[in-house]
Structures are given as C-alpha cells and as structure tokens.
Amino acid sequence: MTTPTVGTPPLVEQLKRGLDAPICLTWELTYACNLACVHCLSSSGRRDPDELSTAEAKSVVDQLAALQVFYVNLGGGEPMLRKDFFEIVEYSVASNVGVKFSTNGTYLDADAARRLASMSYLDVQISLDGMDAATNDAVRGDGSWAVARRAMDNLAAADFGEFKISIVCTRHNVDQLDEYKAMADDYGAQLRITRLRPSGRGVDSYHDLRLTNPQQRQVFDWILAHPGVLTGDSFFHLNALNAGPDATGESLPGMNMCGAGRIVCLIDPIGDVYACPFVIHDEFLAGNVRDEGGFATVWRESTLFTELRQPQSAGACASCGSFDACQGGCMATKFFTGLPLDGPDPDCVYGHADDALATIDLGSGPRPSQDHSRPGATIPGVAFTGGAIPGVAVPVPVTLIRKP
Amino acid sequence: MFDPNGAYRLSPRVGLRPEPFGALAYHFDTRRLVFLKSTDLVDLVESLDDHPSATAAIEALAPRRRRSFETALASLFDSGVVEAA
C-alpha cells in the first residue's frame, strides 16, 4: 500500500473520515453508582441487569486488543463497584490495552491503591468538582469531597505516581482552577479539566452550571497559560476565540475536531455502542458488542458511524469566520439542548446560539434514552432499588442528598 | 540527540498501528500518541532494526528523501517512538 505524500488532505480531514479502529474509547463498566452527581453523563445509579458478564467483558478486551485500540477510558457509574473490576482491568492491561479509569474514589482504599500502583499501562483519575466540600458536594453529593481526597491520599501513600485529578468546569468552580493546580502539584498529580455537557442528568443541570461567556474566555486563557494541564481536547469550541477580532494567535493544544464515531466512541455497560460518551441516546446508537461481528463490525459498518464519517454541513455556521477554528462545537451539546446539529454550539463564544436558545423552553430538548438514576437519597451499597450490588465493602458511609 | 549514523529501532514500549495515511504510534509509558503521516515512513521505522544505522535504512528505502526522513526520525526519536538500538 502506498500513500502519496504530496496532495493528501490534512490529517484532520483524514481523521474525519474515520480510522480503521478507535484510538481509544470510553467504556462504562456499570450503571451502578453510590453517588448521584447532578451532571452524570450516563444517568447512573442502579446496576442494569443486562450488563456485560465477566466473560463478555473479557471478550470485548480481546476484540479491542485485536484492533490495536491503544487504551480504554473505563468509567460508569462507579467502575470499582463491579466485583470483577480488577479482573477486567488486569486482563486489559495484560492484553496491551492500556487502562485509564475514572472513579469517585469511594472504594479506592489503601489496598486498592497498592494494587493499582503495581500495574503498568494504568492511569487513575479521581473526579472532584470543587476545591472545597461545599462547591463539590453541591454537584457530587454530600461526603463526596472527603472520599475523593482520601482516595488521593491513598494513591499518594501507595506511591502510585502521577495520578489524575479530573474536574468538570462549572460556573461555580472555574475561579478555583489555580487552587486545583496547586493541589495537583502538591500530590505530584496531573490536572485534567473537561467541559460540562447537557448529557444524562446534565440535561437538567446544564443551564445552572454552564460557564458564563466571560468564564469561557477565562478558561481559554487559563488552559493556554497551563500547557501541562490535560483537557481531553474537550474545549475545542473555545478555539473560536482565536479567530475573532481579539485573537491571541494561540490555539488550544490537541485535536481540533469532534471524534465521535470517527476516532472515539462509547461502549455502555450493556454493550451498546454510541458515537461518544456524551450522546447516550437512541439517535446515536450504532449497535451492540453482542451483535454478530462484535465491536469491529459496529465500528466499521454501522449506518450511524458511516454517516458521521461523511462531510458534515456547517449549516448556519458556514458564514461565520470562526468555523474552521471551532468546527461548530460539540454535537452532543447541541443535541441535548434542542439545537440543530448543523448550527452553533450553545456555548458559542460569540453568542451565535443565544437567539435560538431563547426560543427553546429549558428542558424541552431530547431526553436521554435510558435513566438508571436511583430515586431519592441513599447510602452507598444499601438503598439500591435495582438489586444489591454484590461484593462491595463500604469503607465510609456517605449520605447523599441531591441538591438543586 | 539523534545521530543518523547511529543504530535505531522502534521502541518496544510503542504500539504501531497501520492506518491508510501511515500509522498511529502510541507510547505506553509516556501515553503520547504520534502520527506517522506516510506509509513510507512506517516502512522506514519498521526496517530500522535490519540496518546498522538510520542512514543505511534510508539509503535502502529512498535515498533521495534522506533529508526529510532524517528530520522525521529525529522527531520520532525525541518523542520516544524510536530509540537507540
């Protein structure tokens, strides 16, 4: 096979046509979660009885290894609630599929920290959405700040090395980024900041938590000033700031494009394959790993992914001089706010979506196709209505009260 | 510092995955993803182990593109994709 080195389209254009296999993908291992974060992308809480078995999960790992998927982002729900969590993680790492996993830290006790520290090809990120308990717990639930900090202490004590602290940027914690950075530095940890999206339960909390327009500029400048901070490329819509009249001449690092169904995707706990972690909705469901041909066939042949790899229309953004810089923003964010996909992102830095947003009743957009939320307040491992979560030792009781 | 007269190889800590445009290289230690933007460059990287020096590998593959291949190899060396053999 030869590829001419002259006349080939830029790499980004080639990536938009989709890769033979994802670079990485998000794999939510379970819908079970002891927390009930108001912005949970997967509306997690109760385990789904149809979740992949250990054997099925290992089969998925085998398929990803055969496709040379470099790593998986394991999440949930709370992935450590699966009693075979370590079995799956160790199997994946041994199969050369690296693991990055997100946890709220509740079950990351000293023993777990030591076990994780002993593995290569493994990254851990602890979610923390506020530097103080009040800011964090308003979003993630009472007691969640304390357990996250304890998990970080355990990782540090186990000499895990450079773990990650992951923050979803909201209008309430955006002013704390410097403090976050100092905390990460103290731990020898890496900071990761990501964009809030109106997915899952976020469909109801997005409008109260989303960054204000001046805060978006603040985040853009802060990321540029802190090149070591990870972003998962999730703020690419802010690159429009670099194309406007007050452009700084700098773009955010990373890939400036939406990778949904092209270079990334999501496998949910029951094996459903979605275009990305932010669009758990029937309209973005490509297939299931249990289908004939498994994951590879879904990735390569599904109607949805084939469509996503066709040239996309800029639509209402076509006349905007910043389109090349921001690519119209995030598909999922547009979808769940009820905006057309071929128009501006609701967080368009120039406010081009404001008029359209004003005509939409808040909460009248599409709803997630599944909801595993637990009703009401609960204590981890106890008040689960969807069946008991097996094999879970609860080191710290956390009473969760969902706050508005 | 990359020296074209030295012997090199693809790092055993790197996963190299063919793609239509060339290949993706993922370094499992640094977690860095690197794009190899031509299949010729992929062939070169994979052939390094068979030659006593980077220059010899380039000579065997496409001597007329020596300068651009040396630049590419130096970059891959800096990112740890290619290492001294």
Image (cartoon, coloured by chain):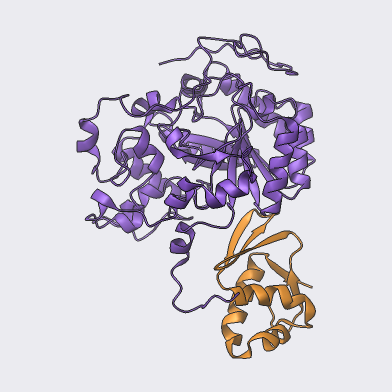
**Quadrant location, the C terminus of chain A:** top left
Q: Residue at x 61, y 9 (%)?
A: A383
> In the rendered image, what is the letter of the chain coloured orange?
B
Residue situated in front as seen by the camera: A40 or A336: A336
Residue A52 percent location from the top left of the image: 67, 31
Q: Position of residue A327 (x, y in %)?
A: 35, 53
Instruction: Say above or below: B67 vs B82.
Output: below
Above or below for B26 versus A84: below
Quadrant including the N terminus of chain A: bottom right
Figure chain in purple: A
Figure check: B22 above or below A235: below
Identity of the residue drawn at 54% across and 68% down: B21
Residue in front for this viewpoint, A401 or A260: A260
Tell me what residue is drawn at x 73 percent, y 46 percent.
A62
As drawn, A311 above or below A288: below
* x, y percent for residue A44: 54, 23
Compared across the picture, whether B4 is left or right of A40 comes to right
Q: Residue at x 50, y 56 (%)?
A: A18
Could one spot residue A144 in this view of the protein? yes
Residue at the far bottom in the pictured view:
B64
Can residue A233 be seen in the rendering of this structure? no
Would residue A279 be found to the left or right of residue A326 on screen?
Answer: right
Give percent across and percent down for residue A41.
Answer: 49, 30
* Front residue of A266 and A256: A266
The number of numbered discs placed on residues in the rendered structure image is: 0
